[in-house]
Image: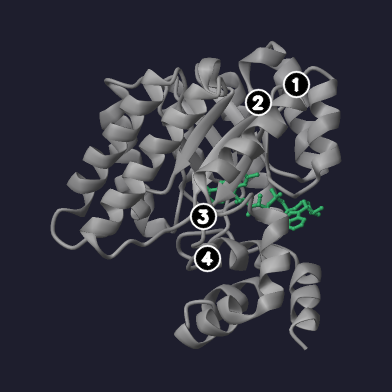
């Protein structure tokens, strides 16, 4: 309930201005975001690689309304992939990138889907040159079908292009079934957006059941499951399902967000699992911060206290 209310309030311009202007917000952002520059992103990737972790870098931003901005975001990803490659961090998929289709033009009026497809194709080509992969993030439900269409179209040339399924959405099991039989790389997460009840499960319990259902489909399928959660119970179930489906530790991975349960990230990696940390960077952190605050009432209370 609080989560939905916060996500709804976050759309207001006033709240946006108040939060981004609050000096205390930066301290909290620092927990979740690696820094503002390409150099910060590369340094974070190196630190995590040295700790035995894999990385997915996300250049912050979403809901682009200007074509030149979609172009600038695309250019930043291409630059980042070049720098990761030069630093020896991308080969073999050690550090990959996560891209939000709305940041590269999906919702631009007119030919948004075409623009986003062309921009993502450029990022995929740069990732291939760098020896690594791209994963398309999942955004609100209106973006899901076009995102999956783009992923399916580009997988013909870039077979390792990954996409995300949000267990919160009622369509998730059907999407997992299709993606698992296509042999795709699929990140499964709970889903961070506020969705209407026709589209999404509303209780935690239903979302967790859906997550477990989707995990079973992905683990039993032909693709590469990427289990993105910090939830200890679901992490345990993932391990059990992997054993039951005869998967080796290299045939799936766990994923967690930068700054959340870092000891658990290291524990799983030390036990021989592949663990990838999702690392956002850039100055456009508002939407990302609000989703992290909405996940944890404790975070929100801490944030509000710090504003006093
Ligand atoms: P849950 O919210 O139940 O949290 C389980 C435990 O994790 C908590 O008890 C706490 O210990 C810790 N925790 C979780 N969130 C925290 C926070 N913000 N601060 C501090 N501790 C926290 N969503 C989406 O809609 N589209 C996407 O593309 C992605 N991509 C993505 C990539 C990766 C690698 C991850 C891990 C997650 C995403 N998400 C996402 C976000 C995801 O949908 C979800 O909102 C968060 O992962 C939180 O859900 P959990 O599964 O961790 O469970």
**N-term mark: 3 or 4:** 3
Residue drawn at x 66%, y 61% is 292
Q: Measured from the top left, where is residue 245 in percent x and y?
A: 67, 15
Question: Which numbered disc, 1 or 4, marks the residue closer to the eye?
Answer: 4
Separation of marks 4 and 2 at Cα, in angstroms: 26 Å
For the residues labelled 1 and 2, say whether their Cβ atoms are less than 8 Å apart: yes
Whether residue 256 is visible, yes or no, is yes
From this view, report whether residue 141 is shown above or below residue 173. Answer: below
Separation of marks 1 and 2 at Cα, in angstroms: 7 Å
The residue nearer to you, when weighing 104 against 140, is: 104
The residue carrying mark 2 has its beta carbon less than 8 Å from ligand 1: no
For the residues labelled 4 and 2, say whether their Cβ atoms are less than 8 Å apart: no
| Residue that mark 3 sits on | 282
The residue nearer to you, when weighing 190 against 99, is: 99
For the residues labelled 1 and 4, say whether their Cβ atoms are less than 8 Å apart: no
| Residue that mark 2 sits on | 253
- Work out which quarter of the rendered image holds the C terminus and state it: bottom right
């Amino acid at each position: 309930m609080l989560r939905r209310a916060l996500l709804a309030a976050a759309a207001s311009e006033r709240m946006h201005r108040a939060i981004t202007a609050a000096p205390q917000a930066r301290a909290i952002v620092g927990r979740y975001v690696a820094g503002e520059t390409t150099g910060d992103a590369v340094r974070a990737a190196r630190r995590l690689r040295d700790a035995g972790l894999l990385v997915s870098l996300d250049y912050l931003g979403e809901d682009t309304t200007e074509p030149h901005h979609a172009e600038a975001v695309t250019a930043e990803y291409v630059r980042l992939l070049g720098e990761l490659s030069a630093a020896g961090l991308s080969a073999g998929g050690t550090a990959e990138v996560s891209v939000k289709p709305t940041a590269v033009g999906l919702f631009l009026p007119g030919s948004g889907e075409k623009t986003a497809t062309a921009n993502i194709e450029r990022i995929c080509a740069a990732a291939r040159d760098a020896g690594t992969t791209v994963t398309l993030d999942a955004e609100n439900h209106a973006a899901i079908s076009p995102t999956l269409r783009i992923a399916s179209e580009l997988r013909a040339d870039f077979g390792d292009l990954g996409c995300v399924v949000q267990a919160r959405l009622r369509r998730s099991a059907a999407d997992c079934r299709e993606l698992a039989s296509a042999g795709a790389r699929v990140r499964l997460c709970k889903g961070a957006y506020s969705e209407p009840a026709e589209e999404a499960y509303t209780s935690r319990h239903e979302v967790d059941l859906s997550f477990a259902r989707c995990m079973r489909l992905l683990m039993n399928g032909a693709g590469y499951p990427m289990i993105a959660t910090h939830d200890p119970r679901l992490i345990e179930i993932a391990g059990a399902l992997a054993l039951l489906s005869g998967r080796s530790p290299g045939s799936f991975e766990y994923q967690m967000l930068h700054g959340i349960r870092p000891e658990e990230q290291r524990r799983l990696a030390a036990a021989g699992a592949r663990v990838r940390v999702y690392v956002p960077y850039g100055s456009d952190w508002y939407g990302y911060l609000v989703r992290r605050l909405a996940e944890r009432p404790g975070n929100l209370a801490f944030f509000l206290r710090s504003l006093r």
